[in-house]
Amino acid sequence: DTAVSQTPKYLVTQMGNDKSIKCEQNLGHDTMYWYKQDSKKFLKIMFSYNNKELIINETVPNRFSPKSPDKAHLNLHINSLELGDSAVYFCASSQSGTWNNEQFFGPGTRLTVL
Amino acid sequence: AQSVTQLDSHVSVSEGTPVLLRCNYSSSYSPSLFWYVQHPNKGLQLLLKYTSAATLVKGINGFEAEFKKSETSFHLTKPSAHMSDAAEYFCVVSDRGGGSARQLTFGSGTQLTVLP
């Protein structure tokens, strides 16, 4: 069974559209994350979220918003898509409580904005 | 504040020869350090992690890394490269600072090419 899954795997859309990427984990973890990987493979944290706390990277535009219907899901909603949003987006999860826990990553969603 | 520097953006080795991927870190606290691997069009997979126990850490697929506090380094090595090792490798640091949800800081990655 897939531990962290994302849908869709590929997403091609026009500028100005609104889109969502879904993420689910079946590991029982209480913390989930969204990362953006640019064309140079650089990975940057966008959000981390558990039941108590949402931490937002201050460089993330407010067009991006995480939505968590329950502990196993953290979806990423993007409004008014721009060309610069094209990237691969990775979801991850971990168990909080200790600061050195491994994060488990999903397979990624490749977003292309035309 | 924490940061990580991967000293080589590309490394090429011949199959069967040793691999060395270099990583230096900066951290305000005692850090945890990780190496992740990303194969083409795949997600990231943990190779190994250092969490203040033994300084020489063994991971999957024959990889290991040594934490050297005096040099602030955490270089990844493997005695003999295999074709399947060709991938992007990320050095990652996490320290005690920050909120309750721990955040990782990634290096810029090293692309490993294995030549036949």
Image: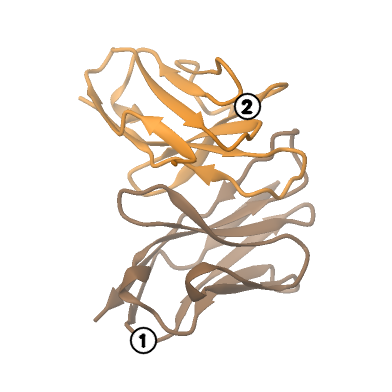
Chain letter of the residue carrying label 1: B
- Among the chains pictured, the one given brown colouring is B
Q: Tell me the residue at 39%/42% (across/down).
A: A107
Which of these two is toward me, A41 or A2?
Answer: A2
Q: Is disc 2 on the same chain as disc 1? A: no
A42 vs A33, left or right, is: left
User: For this rendering, which residue is in front, B114 or B106?
Assistant: B114
Q: Toward which corner of the image does residue A7 lie, by quadrant?
A: top left
Q: Name the residue under label 2.
A: A49
In which quadrant of the rendered view does residue A1 lie? top left
Q: What residue is rendered at 37% in x and 41% in y?
A: A38
The colour assigned to chain A within the rendered structure: orange
Pinpoint residue B98: horizontal percent, then vertical percent: 74, 37
Measured from the top left, where is residue A62 in percent x and y? 50, 16
Nearer to us in this view, A91 or A1: A1
Which residue in the structure is indicated by mark 1?
A: B16
Q: How far apart are marks 1 and 2 (CA)?
A: 43 Å
